[in-house]
Amino acid sequence: MYWQKRFDRENPDKELEEKILRIHEDNKDYGYRRMRAELNNQGIHVNKKKVQRIMQKLNLQVTSFTRKSRKYSSYKGKVGIVAPNRIRRRFNTHIPHQKVTTDTTEFKYYEVDSKGHMTMHKLYLDPFMDMCNGEIISYGIAKRPTAKSVMDALDKAIKITSDCPYRRTFHSDQGWAYQMRAYSNRLKEERIFQSMSRKGNCYDNSVMENFFGLLKQEIYYGVVYYSYEELKSEIERYINYYNEKRIKEKLGWLSPVQYRLSLQAA
């Protein structure tokens, strides 16, 4: 009778399980810590071990993939202006739009012709990130690494950050695009400090490297894209999701946009 009563008893966690499943639909890479934080943000306070147990029961574990390609390098030697490293790994700031960083990364996609032959192509992403909250404030996407993609994203980043009451600093590595006179002169026109990582030192721009790692882990590794538009659309969707919905522990379990708005309201 004891075991029969246990089997007949209604599931006491039914509502919580349904809530976790709904959150998981939009946030498929949330582990139990981030899931618990999102529940707390929605006014549902629950022990982290219980969240972990329920996610295991519902088979909602996050799948991890290892990096399968070498890192893209835009360094072509000294082909223009090399700026000093003004940031010097001081990435933290409580002032929105004061410190901005950028870099370029590449993705692969495949196309099948009428004869069934598959060819590999590349897509390049040029994002500009606000170091205050990790928000991607502008970006360019192109089939080739082009100056136009970088300069268009730069112009948009300059416009968005023009509300900063302090002098801004734009950081990058020593890639060819950031050494261009057009790039450096554009920053000088706006009285923006230019900063560059030391040659071959990825840790000098680790905040952007971390973003690239998240982006590729959550939408790229383990997935094959069969057109430029399909891959481009998924990157754009992810950046919007990352900015507006993906909560971070260092931001008090708020998304980048939520955190910026909280600072502006204070």
Image: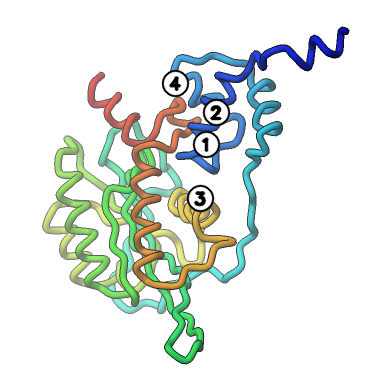
How far apart marks 4 and 2 lie (CA) works out to: 13 Å
Q: Which residue is located at x 30 percent, y 24 percent?
A: 262
Residue 84 in view (yes/no): no
Q: Type of residue at label 3?
A: Leu
Q: Which residue is located at x 48 percent, y 26 percent?
A: 38
| Disc on the earlier residue, 1 or 4 | 1
- What residue does disc 2 label? 20
- What residue does disc 1 label? 24
Q: Residue 214 got which mark?
A: 3
- What residue does disc 4 label? 41
Q: Position of residue 192 (x, y in %)?
A: 20, 51
How far apart marks 2 and 1 lie (CA) works out to: 6 Å
Q: Position of residue 118 (x, y in %)?
A: 50, 84
Q: Secondary structure at mark 3?
A: helix
Q: Give the farthest residue toward the left.
A: 189
**Badge nearest the viewer, 1 or 4:** 1
Nearer to the camera, 144 or 194? 144
| Disc on the earlier residue, 4 or 2 | 2
Q: Type of residue at label 1?
A: His
Does residue 87 lie above or below 24 as drawn? below
| Disc on the earlier residue, 4 or 3 | 4
Whether residues under marks 4 and 2 lie with C-beta atoms below 8 angstroms apart, the answer is no
Whether residues under marks 2 and 1 lie with C-beta atoms below 8 angstroms apart, the answer is yes
Whether residues under marks 3 and 2 lie with C-beta atoms below 8 angstroms apart, the answer is no
Q: Position of residue 227 (x, y in %)?
A: 40, 72
